[in-house]
Image (cartoon, rainbow, N blue to C red):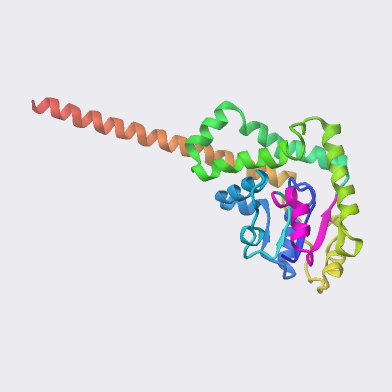
Amino acid sequence: MEVIGVGFGLGRTGTASLKLALERVGFGPCYHMFEVLERPERARDWMEAADGGPADWDRILAGYRSTVDWPGTYFWRELVDAYPGARVVLTVRDPAAWYDSAAGTIFRATLRSSRPLARLLLRLGRPRALREFTPMVRRLIWDGTFDGRFADRDHAIRVFERHGEEVRRRVPADRLLVLDVGQGWEPLCAFLGVPVPDEPFPRVNDAKTFRRRQRVAALRTLAAPALLGTAAVAAAAALALRSGRGRARR
C-alpha cells in the first residue's frame, strides 16, 4: 500500500476523481467503495474488522497500491499505522458545501433504500451478497462515523471538521497532502514525485452524475422483481394448462 486516502468521501470530496488520478499516475489499482459495489462479498471483511476482529490488511487490500473513500476511511488510523511508508492524502472541501451535497445525494439515496417497498424490491431483485453492502454502509458511515445523526447538519459538519483536524495532528506534515481536487494535477504529482500528465485532471461523480446512476440502479432493481413476477405468472399458467389437459383426458 503506497497511498492512503483519508478524505471523508461520500462521493463529495473528490475521492472518485482521486481514484482515477492515482491510477493514471501509476498508483493503481485503487481501492474505493466502488470495489465493494462490484464485489459485495468484500463487505464481510470490513464488517469483521469493525466488530473488532483481527484485520489482515494485506489480504483485504491484496493487489491494490492505494485506497481512497470508505470503507478504508473508517479505518484510516489502522491503515496509516499498518503501512508506515505510505503517503497520506486528505481530500477537503468547504464543510457546508460538502454536507449539502452529501445530504442531497448519498444520504437521500440511503433513506429511500430503507423504505419498506425498497427493502422488499432489494430482497427480490438483488443477490444475497449485495444485501450485505447496505448494513456495512450503515455500520461504518451513518452509525459508526456520524452516530446515527447525519440528518443533524451541525453535528455532521462537526464530525467532518474534527476528522480533518485529527488527520492533520496525527499524520506528520511531510507524509500528508491536504488536497482540494480542484487544484488539479500539480500538488498531487509533486507530492508523489511523478510527472504531471498531459491531460485534464479527472472530474467524475458530481451530484448530477450520482443522481443519474441512482436512477439507473433503481430501474434495474425494479426490473428484476418484474421479471420474476412475469416468470411466476408464466409458470402458473403452464401448470394450470397442464392440469386442465389432464382433467380433460380423464
Image height of 26 relative to 225, above or below: below
Quarter of image, res 4: bottom right
Residue 100, image x, y percentages: 81, 37
Q: Look at the image and tell me in which quarter the C terminus lies.
A: top left
Quarter of image, res 245: top left
User: How many numbered discs, if any?
Assistant: 0
Residue 242, image x, y percentages: 19, 32
Image height of 126 relative to 2, above or below: above
Residue 66, image x, y percentages: 72, 62
Residue at (77% x, 46% y) in the render: 12
Q: Which residues are magenta?
A: 71-92
Residue 25, image x, y percentages: 75, 69
Q: Look at the image and tell me in which quarter the N terminus lies.
A: bottom right
Q: Residue furthest left?
A: 250
The front one of 158 and 218 is: 158
Residue at (91% x, 52% y) in the render: 169
Left or right? Give the position of 181 relative to 139: right
Residue at (74% x, 60% y) in the render: 82
Whether residue 87 is in magenta: the answer is yes
